[in-house]
Image: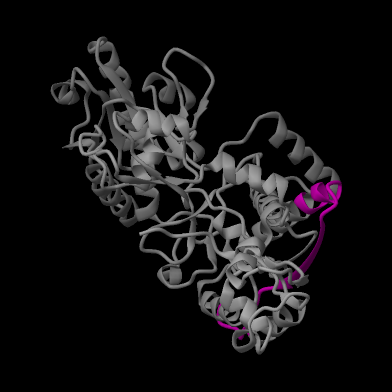
Amino acid sequence: MMCVAALGPLKAQTTHKVAAGETLYGLAVNYGVSQEELIKANPGLESSGLKAGQTIVVPARQVAEAPVAGAVKTMHKVARKETLFGIAKNYGLSLDELLSANPDIKPDGSNLKKGKFLVIPYTVAEVEAWHEAHPTGLKHIKLAVVLPLTSGKTEARRSLEFYRGLLMAVDHFKAQGIDTDITAIDEPAADRSMAPTIGQLRESHPNFVIGPLYPDHFGEISRLAGQTDIMGWVLPFSSKYPGLKTDAKVHMVNTPDEIKAAVVARLLKKTFARPKVIFLNGGTVGGELIFSAALRNALVAEGITVDDLHVSTAEEMKPRLSADSQNLFFIESHDPARAKTLADAIGQLATIAPTAKISALVSSELTTAGILSSSTLHAADAFAFTDCFPSGSASATLEREYTRWFKDPIQDVTPRMALLGYDLGLHLLTGLGKYGTRFSTQKMQAEPVQSHIRFEQIPGQAGLVNTAAYFIHYKRGSAGAELIQAK
């Protein structure tokens, strides 16, 4: 089975004066159209046939749209003695890319036979090169923000800060010649009607809607997007939306637990040659247990060894160490006392078992909330998974600019709402400015100052989810923290 790229804009039609001996088939081949298209553009041609000196209309030829990474570029017929590695190299592909496009081929190439056809996909580099040569982006972008901005409550304060960060991103893009209109709509309380808001959105005709905050309003924005030419809508805060399975226009910044677990498992597999994850049980809160169960299932699906312990000391952990693996002790509980006891024990374990590879695996909640100190994290050689990592000077500069612009300091919360608004704005405007209506099909990422965003469609889900995931490594024996992104 072979799929081809969709066809895009039409070129202007032209005319052709028929020369002696020319045939309908020859003209169709020369102009890149079908014989049926020529006949349709010239009524009566089928019955009368071509005549020398006759002028006929040649219909507009469709021009292929941009290729998509992973889509079929061509087919390759395997020659005698060819190898998977050699074929991949000839087409500029990695072995994984070639195998992914041909799931019936064994990784060792043992069933690669002469004469077999292989799918050759487009690479990310080829897609990027095409877009550089064929700009398709929007020069005028219209965004609508639907968030509670004036209620005076905590969520309004944070929503306002987020919106201000978005405005700073818009200002950043002015210098690049991209005009942006923003319609800010104050979201009504959760129990109030959205009818006036929906009316305002219909009048403003945005490309993208950012918001709302309250789950009671998600369905109404989803219906509006489905009924209009709105390209998409973004949920900037919530990680729970039942419509993710059916709503193709939603983009979720906060990743649902089940998907986040799968992303973390994939990241572990790419980062460590032979990881083993030991769950240090003790979670009591629903959210802790839900994510822990999802992570265990995702690790097993990736073929990663898992173990379970309900202990508190280094001596009790030691018998579960694997000599040939990277032993990652996952701290399930977010209770400050329990988490610190376990992290300290992991640090002690590294002392009593100096030849073993020992690290803690923690969620970002244990680091950003100050539950585990920097010294404790470094002693445990901790890896914290996150999509939020302030980029030093860039984030500090933006915070200073924010205070100068709005005469108001940024709230001390994680993530910083203004920086999240800025990064989301950067991502949206970069994508819409470069890819236009194809924004949701492209894997691209602007350089963030804090919040990493990479929207991706997950199998089994209609909508798109942020799958950006990184490890912050608090390396044992050092003072700083290193951001690790698996290649």
Can residue 119 be spotted in the picture?
A: yes
Q: Is residue 431 left or right of residue 347?
A: right
Where residue 256 sits in the image (x, y, percent)?
A: 42, 57
- Residue at coordinates 26% horizontally, 35% vertically from top-left? 107
- Residue at coordinates 79% horizontally, 49% vertically from top-left? 408
Q: Is residue 379 left or right of residue 152?
A: left
Residue 208 vs residue 236, the one in the foreground: 208
- Name the quadrant containing residue 20: bottom right
Q: Residue furthest left?
A: 319
Residue 98 vs residue 62, the one in the foreground: 62
Residues drawn in magenta = 169-194
- Name the quadrant containing residue 340: top left
In the rendered image, residue 179 lying in the magenta stretch gets the answer yes
In the rendered image, residue 40 lying in the magenta stretch gets the answer no
Position of residue 431 relative to residue 88, above or below, is: below
Where residue 297 sits in the image (x, y, percent)?
A: 24, 49
Where residue 81 sits in the image (x, y, percent)?
A: 29, 28
